[in-house]
Image (tube, helix red, strand yellow):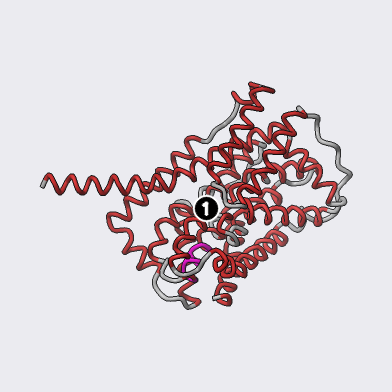
C-alpha cells in the first residue's frame, strides 16, 4: 500500500512538473513584455508613434484607422497577439488622445485584431506553438500549417474589420485637425526604448524564444531607465499576481484532466471532420476560453481534438479568434486591459461582452467557413 501511494505521488509530481515546464516560458514572456511596455510608454515611444500615424493618415479618420488595422494585423502575425496588445494599445490610445476622438474604436481594434489575426503563423499565438508539435505528428509541418491556416486567418480578420466598421462608423468617419507634435521626452531613453521595441519583432519572427527575447529586452530597458530616471523603475507595475493566477489555472486544469475531465471533454468535442463537427470543436474551444482562459482551454482540449489537422485548427479558431467576450479570456485581453487602465481608459464589462460576442461570432464564423473550404 505504501509503495502504491509513493508511485501515485511520484506520477502526480512528475505531471505537475511537466505542466510547470510548459507554462513557465509563457509567464516569463508575460511579465517581461509588460515591463518593456511600461518603460516604453513612459519613455514616450507610443506618443511619438501615434504622432507619426496621424501624419500618415492625411487627416482622414477612416484612412488612419485602416492604417492602424494593417499595422495591428502585421504586428500580431509576426510578433504574437500579446506583443500587439502590449505595444499597440498605447499607440491607439495616443492617436485618439491627439485627435480628441473617442478611444474606444482604437482600443477595441487593438484587442480584437490581436486575437483574431493570431492564426496565420505558429509564432502568432502561444497556442499555435503548443499545437505545432501535434500538427507535426499528423504529418503537417510548418509550411502545411500555414497553408491550412491562411484562409481561416483572412476570414477572421475580414469579419473583425466589418464588425468594427459597422459598430463604430460614426467615431471613425470624417476628418481630423492637423496634429500637434508630441510632448518633449528624454531623448536618450526614447531612442533606446524605440530601438528595443523595433528589435524584438524580427527576433520573434526568426523563431527565437519569446521568453528569452522579452527578458533581455526588459533587462536592457530597466538598466537604461535606472541610469536616466530611477523613479521610473521604482514605479514599475509588474503583474506578478496575474501571472500566478494563470499558473494556477494550468495546474487546476491538469488536475481536472487527471481525475476524469478528459472523457467529458471528448464527449463535448465529438468526433469527425464535417463542417458541423468543426463548428462543434470551435464552439467548445470558444466556450472554454471565455470561461477560464484560452491557454488552459487549449491544454485541456488538445488531447481530444488532435486526431486530425482540421479538428486541431478548428480548436485554434475557437481559442484564438473567439475569446473576446470575457476580460480574462486570453493573456492578450489581460495585457490590453492593463494598458488601458494605465492610460485611464475604462470600457464596461457589459459593453465589452456584447460587442465582443458579435465580433467573435462573425470572425470565427468566417474562419470556420474558410477552414471547411481549405480542408
**Does residue 100 appear to the left or right of 39 in the view shown?**
right
What residue would you read off at disc 1? Answer: 126
Q: Give the residue displayed 15% in from the left and 49% down from the top.
A: 4
Residue 265 falls in which quadrant of the image? bottom left
Estimate the x, y position of residue 248 in percent, counting from the top left. Answer: 40, 43
**Does residue 27 appear to the left or right of 45 in the view shown?**
left
Estimate the x, y position of residue 337 in percent, counting from the top left. Answer: 59, 43
Tell me if residue 351 can be seen: no
Q: Give the residue displayed 61% in from the left and 67% down from the top.
A: 150
Q: Give the residue displayed 72% in from the left and 60% down from the top.
A: 165
Residue 366 falls in which quadrant of the image? bottom right
In the rendered view, tell whether residue 342 sits above or below residue 200. Answer: above
**Does residue 222 appear to the left or right of 288 in the view shown?**
right
Nearer-the-camera pick, 317 or 150: 150
Magenta part of the chain: 310-317
Tell me if residue 162 can be seen: yes
Residue neighbourhood size for the residue with mark 1, other residues' Cα within 10 Å, grouped as few (<14), some (14–19), many (≥20): many
Nearer-the-camera pick, 182 or 35: 35
Whether 371 is among the magenta residues is no
Estimate the x, y position of residue 313 in percent, counting from the top left. Answer: 51, 66
Residue 257 falls in which quadrant of the image? bottom left
**Does residue 71 appear to the left or right of 307 in the view shown?**
right
Amino acid at each position: 500500500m505504501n509503495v502504491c501511494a509513493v508511485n501515485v505521488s511520484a506520477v502526480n509530481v512528475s505531471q505537475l512538473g511537466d505542466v510547470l515546464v510548459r507554462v513557465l516560458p509563457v509567464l516569463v514572456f508575460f511579465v517581461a513584455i509588460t515591463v518593456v511596455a511600461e518603460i516604453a510608454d513612459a519613455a514616450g515611444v507610443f506618443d511619438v508613434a501615434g504622432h507619426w500615424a496621424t501624419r500618415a493618415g492625411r487627416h482622414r479618420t477612416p484612412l488612419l484607422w485602416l492604417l492602424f488595422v494593417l499595422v495591428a494585423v502585421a504586428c500580431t502575425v509576426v510578433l504574437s497577439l500579446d506583443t500587439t496588445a502590449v505595444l499597440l494599445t498605447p499607440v491607439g490610445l495616443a492617436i485618439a488622445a491627439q485627435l480628441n476622438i473617442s478611444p474606444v474604436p482604437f482600443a477595441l481594434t487593438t484587442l480584437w485584431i490581436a486575437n483574431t489575426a493570431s492564426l496565420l503563423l505558429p509564432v502568432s499565438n502561444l497556442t499555435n506553438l503548443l499545437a505545432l508539435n501535434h500538427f507535426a505528428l499528423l504529418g503537417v509541418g510548418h509550411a502545411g500549417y500555414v497553408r491550412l491556416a491562411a484562409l481561416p486567418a483572412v476570414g477572421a480578420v475580414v469579419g473583425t474589420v466589418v464588425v468594427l466598421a459597422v459598430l463604430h462608423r460614426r467615431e471613425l468617419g470624417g476628418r481630423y485637425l492637423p496634429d500637434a507634435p508630441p510632448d518633449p521626452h528624454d531623448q536618450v531613453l526614447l531612442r533606446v526604448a524605440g530601438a528595443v521595441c523595433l528589435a524584438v519583432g524580427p527576433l520573434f519572427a526568426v523563431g527565437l524564444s519569446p521568453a528569452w527575447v522579452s527578458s533581455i529586452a526588459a533587462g536592457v530597458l530597466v538598466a537604461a531607465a535606472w541610469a536616466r530616471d530611477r523613479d521610473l523603475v521604482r514605479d514599475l507595475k509588474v503583474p506578478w499576481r496575474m501571472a500566478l493566477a494563470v499558473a494556477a489555472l494550468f495546474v487546476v486544469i491538469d488536475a481536472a484532466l487527471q481525475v476524469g475531465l478528459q472523457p467529458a471533454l471528448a464527449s463535448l468535442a465529438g468526433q469527425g471532420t464535417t463542417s458541423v463537427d468543426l463548428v462543434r470543436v470551435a464552439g467548445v474551444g470558444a466556450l472554454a476560453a471565455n470561461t477560464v482562459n484560452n491557454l488552459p482551454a487549449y491544454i485541456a482540449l488538445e488531447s481530444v481534438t488532435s486526431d486530425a489537422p482540421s479538428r486541431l485548427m478548428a480548436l485554434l479558431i475557437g481559442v484564438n479568434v473567439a475569446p473576446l467576450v470575457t476580460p480574462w479570456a486570453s493573456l492578450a485581453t489581460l495585457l490590453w486591459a492593463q494598458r488601458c487602465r494605465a492610460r485611464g481608459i475604462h470600457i464596461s464589462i457589459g459593453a465589452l461582452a456584447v460587442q465582443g460576442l458579435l465580433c467573435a461570432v462573425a470572425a470565427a464564423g468566417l474562419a470556420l467557413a474558410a477552414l471547411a473550404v481549405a480542408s
